[in-house]
Amino acid sequence: MQNLQSLLEEFHCYRSDIIYVKGMTYPATLLLLTTLDKFVAFKCFCNLVVANEMVRSLYSFNLKKVLLLR
């Protein structure tokens, strides 16, 4: 639980424009459970959220972009 909270807090420091939303814990938890290293999980989570335009739009509440991407 501490690793999950830490990962999400670190992500907020890394990308403060993307706020925490309900459901963000699910991919973070899966990454923490499947990787042995917290840093690797953090990098994967950042790549998932930042590199994927659809996920980034969902987490940044950009509804216009989400509607265009679907």
Image: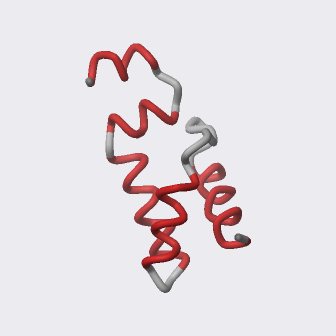
Quadrant (top left, top right, bottom left, bottom right) of the C terminus: top left
- Residue lying furthest bottom: 36
Q: Residue 65's image quarter?
A: top left
Q: Residue at x 64, y 49 (%)?
A: 12
Give x and y (percent) for residue 20: 63, 42
Task: Name the colouring of the figure.
Answer: secondary structure
Frontmost residue, 42 versus 24: 24
Quarter that holds the N terminus: bottom right
Q: How many marks?
A: 0
- Above or below residue 38? Residue 30 is above
Name of the residue lying farthest toward the right: 2
Q: Does 8 sit above or below residue 55?
A: below
Residue in view at x 62 percent, y 64 percent: 7
Residue 53 x/y as whole percent: 33, 36
Residue farthest top in this picture: 64
Which one is nearer the viewer's eye here, 64 or 12? 64
In the image shown, does 30 or 38 lie closer to the viewer?
A: 30
Which of 25/40 is in front?
A: 25
Dividing the picture into quadrants, the one containing residue 21 is top right
User: Horizontal and vertical percent for residue 44?
Assistant: 41, 64
